[in-house]
Image (cartoon, rainbow, N blue to C red):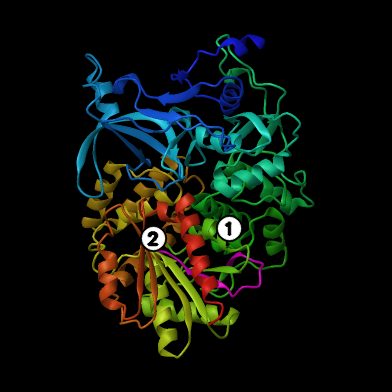
Amino acid sequence: DPATAGCTGLTRVVCSGEALPYDLQERFLARFPAELHNLYGPTEAAVDVTHWTCVDDGSGIVPIGRPVANTELHVLDRHGLPVPQGVTGELYLGGVQLAEGYHRRPDLTGASFVRHTDGRGVTRRLYRTGDLVRRLPGGALEYRGRTDAQIKLRGFRIELGEIEAVLSAHPSVAECAVLLREERLAAYYVPAPGAAPEPASLAARLRAALPAYMVPTAWSPLAAMPLTHSGKLDRKRLPDPTAAPAGDRPAAPPRDAREQRLLEIWAELLGRSGLGIHDDFFDAGGHSLLALRLISRINAAYGTALGVSAVLAHPTVARQAALLRDGHGTDGRPGAAVPLAGGGVQPPLFLVHPVGGGVLCYREAAAVLGTGRPVHGLPAPGLTPGTPPAATVRELADLGLRAVREIQPAGPYRLGGWSFGGLVAYEMAHTLTEQGEDVALLALLDTGFPGTDGAPDTLLADFAEDLLRSAGLGMPEPLAASLAAAQAAGHEEDGLRTVRDELIRQDAGAGLTPGELARHYAVFRANTLAAAAYRPPAHRGAVHFYQSTDGARLGSARAWARAVRGPLVVRELDTDHYGIVRGAHIRETAKDMEKIMGEGLDR
């Protein structure tokens, strides 16, 4: 507008109340000599609590800034724990300016104004904003949407705003929106001027920053976003999503009756259609419980005795059909290594199963590490039908070493394990060291030192929580009390029926047979008892310990320091025991492990 040239007396403009788009900031700074300030804040905290002086830095981001005087900003995950820099969490506010609450609404007051205790034991009164933010490298905050856009898909709780924030940062995307449509994530985007991004490239960008279950499987380019009369996005007017999932190739149809039947099982479990025989089960939304249910359905349909690790080794319909067609009705020798990621010329990394026995938990780590080196998981014996669980950590270590040496006859070896898996990895590393072998990496991920995790008098409750949390589901407190009572009374079978009922209630257990559940409980129970009886020997090698800050295992590093005779390197991650193998936390850990392994190449 030519009239803007006459605004020579304008010195300062303050924006607040709505998110300030980056392109609007650029247009303002190009036309006016005035300062532009971006503020953020809710009425519950005296309106404005952050400030940012806008600059044309080419970042594509307009932060909401840093706290104003007498204000505290806390970025927390859903468990109330601080998230690392760059990770999206919910913004909580503290300080003298907080309101007392909502007039005559104690229910709303109790839900929004909370008491929070940090890792140092300090309790504060905070206001829960419901806004998603992330901390930028300089310390400023970036607004990334609302928590009330949270949805639940196949057992996972997903923040749609977090997906939209990552997608909108793509230079070829001008605007975007993500919705839950027909039990799948649908992405809508308006290309930036002169750009024509392919859905496959956008999906790849999201996969690099988010877990697989948060990547949309339907993509729709739009000329413009539908708007309401007030100029805001009208989500109700977004069209039906594109039928084909994003990817380099269309969904491949089944070639025979076996592939057709497997596709039908997949569609029923995943709650979606349009899948092809080369689609990856986990990229399509599968998780640990769904993999267990898938194997249960396949075994029932074909009379096989496959274990859940078969889904990891053969994650597509085509490969599962070939496995059945070739007559391989079992997983082979119990304890055999399962390939999690292949390719690359670097020496392999071996990751040992946690207490539940499976190795699905390492998929995200393998995605980071597997670009340059093979990554293998070592599942527990006992998960495959007809095989008993191991009784001791020593026995598991011997089985693990046998599997490792089949792939890598000589060192240096690289080992790791989350939780209970760290105990087995530690025993394996100690044995190798005593035999004169070189261990280039021993990584323990939040592994409690034996004797610090409590007595095994809550086995059923711990088993249920492990199943639920592994699938991204919550553990109801009444369920824990009921299972503890069943175990105390010696009614484990009744307790397992209660666990199965809860899985079905949370839409996660239908199709899971009582026998499958009992077999997994037997492995969980054997491993828990093995951990309680294990006494770690003095290890002369280096140990890299990655510790969560949820409090349950904060003493473990000090306990390990008394057993380790070599260097003990401790890194803390602001998450809980399950979060340490997910999302940004496991990506951070995996990159650190890769750096350590890279430094050891000259050994």
Question: Is label 2 in a helix, a strand or a loop?
Answer: helix
From the image, tell me which residue sits under label 2.
521
- Farthest residue to the front: give it: 8
Q: Earlier in the sequence, mark 2 or mark 1?
A: 1
Query: Is residue 342 shown left or right of residue 51?
Result: right
Q: Which residue is pictured at 21% across the width and 21% down the height?
A: 100
Q: Which residues are magenta?
A: 339-354
Residue 396 horizontal/vertical position (percent): 42, 76
Residue 49, quarter of picture: top left
Residue 188 horizontal/vertical position (percent): 65, 29
How packed is label 2: few (under 14 Cα within 10 Å), some, or many (20 or more)?
many
- Farthest residue to the right: give it: 255
Foreground mark, 2 or 1, reads 1
Q: Which residue is pictured at 61% across the width and 38% down the height?
A: 216
Query: Is residue 229 shown left or right of residue 65?
Result: right
Q: Is residue 211 magenta?
A: no
Q: Is residue 283 visible?
A: yes
Residue 367: numbered disc: 1
Q: Quadrant of the N terminus?
A: top right
